[in-house]
Image (cartoon, rainbow, N blue to C red):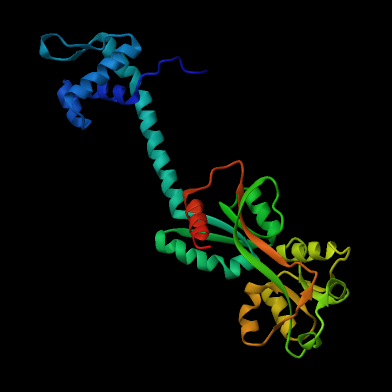
Amino acid sequence: MPLSLPVPDLVSLDLLRSVAEFGSIRQAAIAHNVSQPAASMRLKSLEKSLGLTLLDRSGGNARLTPAGAAVVEWSAQILEGVSELLVGARALRREGQSSLRVAASMTVAEYMVPVWLVKLNSVVPDISVSLQMGNTEQVAEIIRSQKADIGFVEGWSVPHEFNHRIVADDDLAVVVPPDHPWAHRKKVVTAKVLASTPLILRELGSGAREVLGKALEAHGLQPLPFVEVGSNTAIKAMVLSGVAPGVLSSFVTKAEVETGRLVVVKTRGVSLDRSIRAIWSKGGEQTPSAKRLLKLISDGR
């Protein structure tokens, strides 16, 4: 049931309780770190809001009237409850600031999250972080079931039930070892050639698979998996062995491309760019640690 207005001020009720405890407005004011005139004004305002005379000020002293004593007794439980609420809220704030549950898709977890956590640790040295890894669909389910405070996914789309923010850009690349025919191909690989070639791909539900699928779908085509693998490292190893071309994030292949162990194949008409997004539930407030991490990432873009 809604409270009747006006509602008495809690600080003033606490001040009245101190008057009862110390026996004077002056001592109560000292205990509350306010001036005596300020304390007197608060107490008069409390009397006005309740419509009661709470203090007998005759004779230069302030003594509780029977009504004042009753209000002190009735308010004791309220003030104790508020005190418990404040202590609990502080504990929750500390918990939110000292711990963070992150869910991230494989590429993000392997190549981006470690860098982000180093930055976060420099700002919040005692923070405890738990990390869950999966493909984009699995990360979305983790956030949906409230098992993580913030998630990071790849791809072109995000379910409407989540808030999201782009935190990084990435490109997929078709890669082969230097002795593969495509490594020296003079003509670019078209969408049709790519779709007709068995490829080493991430599994359905991953952001990489979604991007490649939509890129070929724009031409009325679909990818032809030679093998589907749920690990970037495994795909890279298979591509290096020369089994078949692979499609991987530029983050994953950066070192191998720079050293010449892998070659990026030029393509035409195949849009393989994608965004890395932070996602969180629309129905809940972000924890302080999740907000801090997101700000650090956004500031570093």
The answer to whether residue 125 is visible is no
Q: Give the number of marks.
A: 0
Could you say which quadrant of the image residue 285 lies in?
A: top right
* Residue at (43, 54) in percent of width and height: 98
Could you say which quadrant of the image residue 239 lies in?
A: bottom right
Could you say which quadrant of the image residue 161 lies in?
A: top right
Q: Is residue 112 above or below residue 280?
A: below
Q: Residue furthest left?
A: 59
Q: Give residue 297's position: percent from left, percent from top.
A: 52, 60
Q: Is residue 84 above or below residue 1?
A: below
Q: Give residue 236's position: percent from left, percent from top.
A: 70, 79
Q: 183 left or right of 278?
A: right
Residues 209 and 173: in front is 173
Q: 108 left or right of 217?
A: left
Q: Residue furthest bottom?
A: 179
Q: 213 left or right of 32?
A: right
Q: Give residue 46's position: percent from left, percent from top.
A: 30, 16
* Residue at (53, 68) in percent of width and height: 114
* Residue at (38, 24) in percent of width and height: 78
Q: 146 left or right of 80?
A: right
Residues 31 and 211: in front is 211
Q: Is residue 270 above or below residue 288?
A: below
Residues 53 and 250: in front is 250
Q: Give residue 265's position: percent from left, percent from top.
A: 75, 80
* Residue at (19, 27) in percent of width and height: 29
The answer to whether residue 102 is visible is yes
Q: Is residue 121 above or below residue 63?
A: below
